Amino acid sequence: MTTSSPVIIKAMSDIATRLTVSPPPHWRSGRTVQRMMVHHLLALLPAAIMGVLYFGFDAARVMTLAGMVAVLTEVACQKLMGRDIDVDNFNALYAGVLFAFLLPATASWWVVTMGAGITIVLGRTVFGGFGSNPVCAPLVAWAVCRLSWPSAVDIDLNMAHSLMNYPPDQLKHFGLQALYQFNYTDLLLGKQLGGLGASQVLALLAGGIYLLATGWIRAYIPAAFLAGVVGLSGIFWMIDPGAYADPAFHLLTGSTIFGAFFLATDAASSPVGRLPQVLFGLIAGMMVITIRIYGVYPDGVPFAIMVANLLTPLLDRVRPKPFGGQ
């Protein structure tokens, strides 16, 4: 007669595999905010270098100060809100550099400091922080500075010592006859007055293509934005070429390329779907030309993108009809 071993009953907690449940997504792509910001900063690097080459140490001073103030302001805001300090993802630095790109290289330290602080406080923090802003944060700061201290951010006034001129301003005040002083090759290479980084057309184009090639931005907004600029300016030019500048001029001057690839593509303030992104880009691009022709601001790109940002919630509701839907 054999004796069987006694049955030992263990608690389920002793033998069950312990699973840790965490919020989705569970399948991670490895793309982080830090990596995204690093790639965006790398995309800005050629324009930053060209800005320093053309405008000298002043350009480096403005970019450095704006970046530092933006980061310190982000730290202060996070401390006041009782949040963990999270500036090592470089999003505050990137926002500060974007704001600096819109300024003249000789901008005073106080307007750089005010603008960089406003970028973080009014542009993002009051709406909940990074990723919650309804309008591109650097543009909020630029608009506040432009409306509050117009002479402090005016390109021509601050760069009066330069031998170059600000093309949009020349067109606005002197008409087409003032455009003969500009060579389109020089404009492409950044040999023009403008924002210290926003005027570096070829370098910004290279940076934008880099972001497209690496998949950090999609082509719908930049392509539609540029199509809106070319389309509407082309219509005016064909109607009366003696009164309106051709599309190439509008593409190569002001902050058109900068806006197309770096400002309009701000993930927090732009639409999500393909069709909404196309509509967003077209609206912003056509608004640029509308402001340049009928408005009082020579460039028009910052205000055009801000107007389009305000339409983002409506554009996100535009969805194509599902296949087979009634």
Image (tube, rainbow, N blue to C red):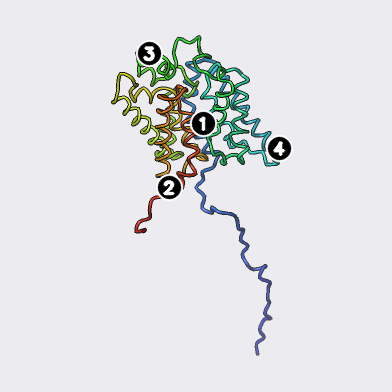
- Which label is found at residue 80? 4
| Left or right position of 76 against 60 | right
- Which label is found at residue 318? 2
State which tag comes first along the sequence, 4 or 3. 4
Q: Quadrant of residue 288?
A: top left
Q: Amino acid at mark 3?
A: Ala
Task: Classify 10 Å Cα crowding around label 4: few (below 14), some (14-19), many (20 and above).
Answer: few
Between circles 1 and 4, the one closer to the viewer is 4
- At mark 3, the secondary structure is helix
- At mark 4, the secondary structure is helix
Q: Amino acid at mark 2?
A: Val
Residue tagged by mark 1? 41
Q: Amino acid at mark 4?
A: Leu
State which tag comes first along the sequence, 2 or 1. 1
Where residue 31 appears, x then y in whole percent? 51, 43
Residue at the location (35% across, 18% down)? 185
| Left or right position of 266 against 237 | right
Task: Classify 10 Å Cα crowding around label 1: few (below 14), some (14-19), many (20 and above).
Answer: many
State which tag comes first along the sequence, 1 or 4. 1
Number of dots carrying numbers: 4
Where residue 312 appears, x then y in whole percent? 48, 41
State which tag comes first along the sequence, 3 or 1. 1
Residue tagged by mark 3? 178
Residue sticking out furthest to the left: 238
